[in-house]
Image: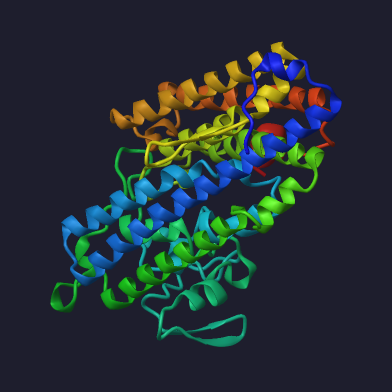
Amino acid sequence: MTRYLTTTALCLLGTSALADIRSDVLENYSNIAEAKYADSLSTARTLQSAVDTLIADPSEANLQSAKSAWLAARVPYQQTEVYRFGNAIVDDWEGKVNAWPLDEGLIDYVDASYGGPSDENELAVLNVIATPKFALSGKDVDATDITPALLEGALHEADGVEANVATGYHAIEFLLWGQDLNGTDHGAGARPWTDYAMGEACTGGHCDRRGAYLKAATELLVSDLEWMSAQWAEGGDARSTVMADNTAGIATILTGMGSLSYGEQAGERMRLGLMLNDPEEEHDCFSDNTHNSHYYDGLGVQNVYLGSYTRIDGSTVSGVSLSELVAATDPALDAEMQSKLSTTMRELGEIKTSAEAGFSYDQMLAAGNAAGEELVMGGVNALIDQTRSIERVVKALGASQIEIEGSDSLDNPGAVFE
């Protein structure tokens, strides 16, 4: 049974009892993970249904429904990203479902301005949808039937190139929106629904194979999320691993919070794109949904610290929190941590509301756009600041030494342009 204790009660507990509370914190952390991945799976299944409808009956309305389902699926999934880094089971798996940026020319047709094969990636414009047979690493590949096994086994990170992303949310995103050719101007990808039409109405060529790819990628996403959901259920490997050692488990939580806040989000997902003024560095670059991805990443960090998650059905999963554990040791530090998290959510919320009002994240990244830079850097600086407090929490709790992921954009800016 999960225990709910006031901070006052926690402060009165001895060392042994505090160890028990750490176990309760980890149980609640695991329960929240189970709920988040279950919600991610549920929304992915809704997306799969919308994709099946689009393929069976191509139309503008059905394409828009599939896009809406994709956007909804991102809300719970982005809140799971705080479970990366510290949890090896999650981090080893994550590249299958959320890898980015991708060389979309591997998958489908691209604009001529995209260029061609490069020394870094010979498969940058393979266009497997238009190419049922091709050579890969000196071997012939038969892609006549586009299946989940083909995407996962032969194409994803083909030739060892990380940009050859063939699976996951962003491959599906590209297949629904197409390339965003607007640069740092307002506007997302504009793939026509006729890219899925049959017969003479088909645009882009190979509409049947495009539909097969989209169907296979969505099926694979669902199966991958089914697997991860099981890892956090009772008896699952991820839950068992984090519950096995209280000290290591608390360190796992803090590693995820710190690495997502600092190197991943503040650095690779926000500061780097602003330094390069490059919309290709957007996390959800085809759909122009990056403002939401940033917001829900931040929310994921906050709800893990506070030990509470609001599910897609409106119900709440909550229990003994890391916040309570910190408050039992250093109430002022807990107040500081909560304040920093609130500041971050306010800054990310300003990016989100500005984008929803028409000032898209693409535009915020444009060179010389002072208002955009101010918005993005507000989020970056808040994330960096909250990471400093996370580091103080690590010391206060006596957690084992943790390694927070860094980013050249924050730690060695000059290297970005080398």
Instruction: Indicate left or right for 80 with 59 as reference.
Output: right
Please name whichever residue, 286 or 308, is drawn nearer the observer in this view of the structure: 308
- x, y percentage for residue 169? 45, 56
Q: Name the residue rendered at 80%, 44% in the picture.
A: 245
Q: Quadrant of residue 291?
A: top left
Q: Name the residue rendered at 51%, 77% in the picture.
A: 149
Location of the N terminus (image quadrant) = top right
- x, y percentage for residue 360? 35, 34
- x, y percentage for residue 183? 37, 44
Location of the C terminus (image quadrant) = top right
Is 203 rendered above or below residue 65?
A: below
Instruction: Indicate left or right for 324 with 112 as reference.
Output: right
Is 246 rendered above or below residue 109?
A: above
Instruction: Indicate left or right for 320 with 275 as reference.
Output: right
Q: Quadrant of residue 340?
A: top right
Q: Name the residue rendered at 65%, 15% in the picture.
A: 336
Please name whichever residue, 253 or 311, is drawn nearer the observer in this view of the structure: 311
Please name whichever residue, 115 or 212, is drawn nearer the observer in this view of the structure: 212
- Please say whether residue 372 is visible from this viewpoint: no
Q: Farthest left residue?
A: 200
Disc count in the image? 0
Q: Quadrant of residue 199?
A: bottom left
Q: Name the residue rendered at 32%, 58% in the picture.
A: 176
- x, y percentage for residue 72? 36, 46
